[in-house]
Image (cartoon, helix red, strand yellow):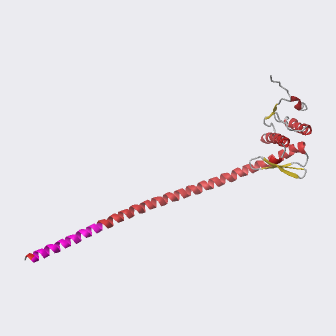
């Protein structure tokens, strides 16, 4: 009797332990499934976020490419007429075969003259000074061909020889017909050849 009762209690305990193990395993599977579901949800959220960022990046790239192309088109639309104006004015100073190279920032990068090409940095101080003045006159005419825009010169032509000074002052005089040109100088006699110039002394 005692052995039988003990055996039954043992078997009951074994069944109970097995039941508990089953419950624990079920809880473990449920917890793991919950974790899987949570991670899957986060993965989907991240995937949607990445897709959104990729679409925004593609849109930004397209916008940048479009704006860059448009800006370059606008710049190029100015390069040709600006070059033409500089060449036309500059030939009255340097000679009939002058040609300049202009980059997309509308800066002079080289001068062609007498069959020779010189980079801007290779030009003499006088040549850069004269060409710089020509560029300013050309810009004034290009911006407003009818009325021009004011051009201010501050002690210009300091490094230029008398022959070039005479030639470039002829272009200044012609530019003064459509633009107001204001000259600040300590040597006003240098500009005496400009007809109709009004002189104002300070001090």
Residue 51 location (% of width, % of height): 52, 59
**Relative to residue 183, is residue 31 drawn left or right?**
left
Q: Nearer the viewer, residue 79 or 109?
A: 109
In the picture, residue 146 is in which quadrant? top right
Q: Is residue 9 magenta?
A: yes
Residue depicted at 53% across the width and 56% down the height: 53
In the picture, residue 184 is in which quadrant? top right
Q: Main secondary structure of the magenta part?
A: helix
Q: Nearer the viewer, residue 174 or 21?
A: 21
User: Which of the image's four quarters has the N terminus?
Assistant: bottom left
Does residue 174 lie above or below 33 as drawn?
above
**Relative to residue 6, is residue 60 drawn left or right?**
right
The residue lying furthest to the left in this view is 1
In the picture, residue 159 is in which quadrant? top right
Residue 79 location (% of width, % of height): 78, 49
- Number of residue marks: 0
Residue depicted at 87% across the width and 35% down the height: 173
Residue depicted at 55% across the width and 58% down the height: 54
**Magenta stretch?**
3-26
User: Which of the image's four quarters has the C terminus?
Assistant: top right
The residue lying furthest to the top in this view is 203
Residue 74 location (% of width, % of height): 73, 49
Q: Is residue 22 magenta?
A: yes
Residue 132 location (% of width, % of height): 81, 41
């Amino acid at each position: 009797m005692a052995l039988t009762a003990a055996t039954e209690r043992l078997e009951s305990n074994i069944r109970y332990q097995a039941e508990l193990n089953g419950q624990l395993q079920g809880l473990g599977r449920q917890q793991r499934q919950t974790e899987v579901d949570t991670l899957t949800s986060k993965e989907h959220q991240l995937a949607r976020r990445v897709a959104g960022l990729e679409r925004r990046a593609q849109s930004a790239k397209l916008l940048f490419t479009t704006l860059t192309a448009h800006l370059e088109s606008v710049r190029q639309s100015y390069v040709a007429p600006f070059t033409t104006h500089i060449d036309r004015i500059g030939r009255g100073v340097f000679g009939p075969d002058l040609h300049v190279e202009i980059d997309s920032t509308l800066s002079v990068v080289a001068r062609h003259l007498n069959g020779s090409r010189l980079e801007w940095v290779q030009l003499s101080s006088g040549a850069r000074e004269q060409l710089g003045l020509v560029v300013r006159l050309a810009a004034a005419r290009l911006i407003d061909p009818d009325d021009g825009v004011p051009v201010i010169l501050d002690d210009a032509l300091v490094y230029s020889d008398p022959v070039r000074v005479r030639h470039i002052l002829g272009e200044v005089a012609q530019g003064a017909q459509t633009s107001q040109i204001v000259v600040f100088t300590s040597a006003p006699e240098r500009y005496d050849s400009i007809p109709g110039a009004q002189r104002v002394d300070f001090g």
